[in-house]
Amino acid sequence: MDGHKHSLRRRPPSSQSNDANFFSSPSQSSLTSFTVKRNSFDPEKPVHVAQDSLFSGSSGWKDYRGFFNLAVLLLYGVLVSPTSWIYFIAMDPWWKWPNLAMVLMSNITIFIVFIMEKLMAWKWLNSQLAFAFYLCLFSLHIFIPAVVTWILQSYPLYSVLSLSTYVILFLKLISYVHTNYWYRCMNTTNRNLKKMLPSYPRNLTLQNLYYFIFAPTLCYELQFPRTNGRRKSFILKRTAEFGCLTLIIIALCQQWVAPLLRNSVEPFTTMNFGLCIERVLKLAVPNHVIWLISFYTTFHSLLNLIAELMEFADRQFYLDFWNAETLAVFWKTWNIPVHRWALRHIYRPMICNGFSKMSAACAVFFVSAFFHEYLVSVPLHMFRFWAYLCMMAQIPLSFVTEKVLKGGLPGNIVMWLSLILGQPLAILMYVHDCFEIQINMPQDSFHCCVINDGAGRWFVYFDKPRSVMTVTDSMTSTYEKAMTTKDQIEFAGNVSESLLEQFWHSIQKIIENNISWSRSDVLISQHRA
């Protein structure tokens, strides 16, 4: 055994030559390989060849996965919480009153308009009486949902969706009534047109009306261009785009915008103009990115999906607004359905009735400004007219870009700056006003929000003189806790986002443990009821 070990440690003399060859072979092989490499080197082989940079469109390079990894690494902290989205939806589901109920009740207006058009087609009702009736009907169509939303508590997001449905129906039904009125007048004044218009009044059917209601257009016609069928691959692609981009928008709002809004409350409250400008500039980029993604999601993914399902052939929902050299051109190209409706039912009728082009344009911007403010102020339960003023400010800006700057590159830059800086400024003003209403109102105690859970309905108040936050069920239980100014600002930021889940979870935990909150099992005072 020892001899065997020794033989392993000391090789026999006969193997020394082999060992020498063994140790010398690597150097020789390396020299040989080096010589081969030198011999295979071609000094005439060119180093530079004609080729495009990877970022050039002609290069054909499409693999940019590394930038996605970089974007993930640059996140300063993952603030996206999918569980909070589920909790946010479950706290006050959209299928509860007043959101879905209001959307379903909008069918009442549709049926009334259908019956009115039938009566006028049968000549049982004259146009003058119908005009007065329609004026009242469409006013109530806009007014009643606003009152219901204002009185009954609901999340602003759901309120915006339900009110948007009423606004879209308002525009569609105006076009439906207006177009049928034109065809009715043409049939009355020129009998020969009956051969040219064989579809009227046979177009007055519920099937025809509801096709128009669901079609991705705001302008009614007797016959719409139709496709030959539905493409399943196109539907799946647009559906995937809409779902993924919607999740990206929600994630960006929670990851990027929400912290900026929370940090912007105090500078606007203390009127620190330097910090206010900084917050506007910080919010400008993420807000604009979200706006661009929202534009693609709505006008390309969603409207193309609806058009494919409805076999609607006209897919021109937008033009090259990014090249607009004036604000007037931008408003004509970025939202084609609304532009066509305004041109057909406001601008051209006013021109035909003797109004100037400026008056007609101002009327179009006024209607647009009204509905912008309607969709912002009513869900937020406050009127500050920032959205209205921003839209009306487009009139002088359009004049500046067209008459002063003469379009071109300066006009395009002003157009982009108005979008990049105008929107975040308006958003911050609304956030500031929400904070002022919810925290700094002069009343001794006022209602901030309503939270629903499995146990019932809880009302959240802030008692300003005592700096106390109160949570009560308005019947037997009341919980109070002192809050500092920082706590108030943070709470206002959560309220402005309508994301109270973290605050509510902490309240529930404290209530269960009965820690640092004073509980009084008595009826709350009358001014809090």
Image (cartoon, rainbow, N blue to C red):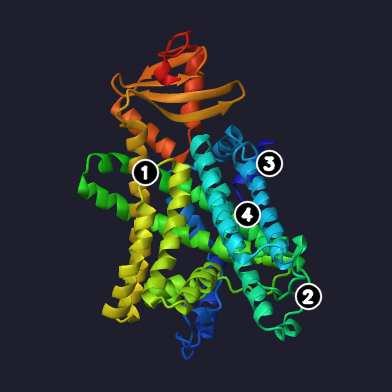
Q: Residue at x 37, y 33 (%)?
A: 438
Task: Please rate how many residues cluster around mark 1, counting C-alpha atoms within 10 Å: few if below 14, some from 14 to 19, many from 20.
Answer: many
Task: Please rate how many residues cluster around mark 3, counting C-alpha atoms within 10 Å: few if below 14, some from 14 to 19, many from 20.
Answer: few
In percent of width and height, residue 459 lies at 48, 24
Mark 4 or mark 1: which comes first in sequence? 4
Image disc number at residue 431: 1
Report which residue position mark 4 lands on.
Answer: 243
Q: Secondary structure at mark 2?
A: loop
Mark 3 or mark 4: which comes first in sequence? 3
Residue pushed farthest bottom? 44
Mark 3 or mark 2: which comes first in sequence? 3
In percent of width and height, residue 274 lies at 21, 49
Left or right: residue 482 compared with residue 307: left
Residue 217 visible at all? no
Report which residue position mark 3 lands on.
Answer: 4
Closer to us: 94 or 386 = 386
C-alpha gap between disc 1 and disc 3: 88 Å
C-alpha gap between disc 1 and disc 2: 48 Å
Q: Nearer the viewer, mark 4 or mark 1?
A: 1
Q: Secondary structure at mark 3?
A: helix
Left or right: residue 118 compared with residue 84: right
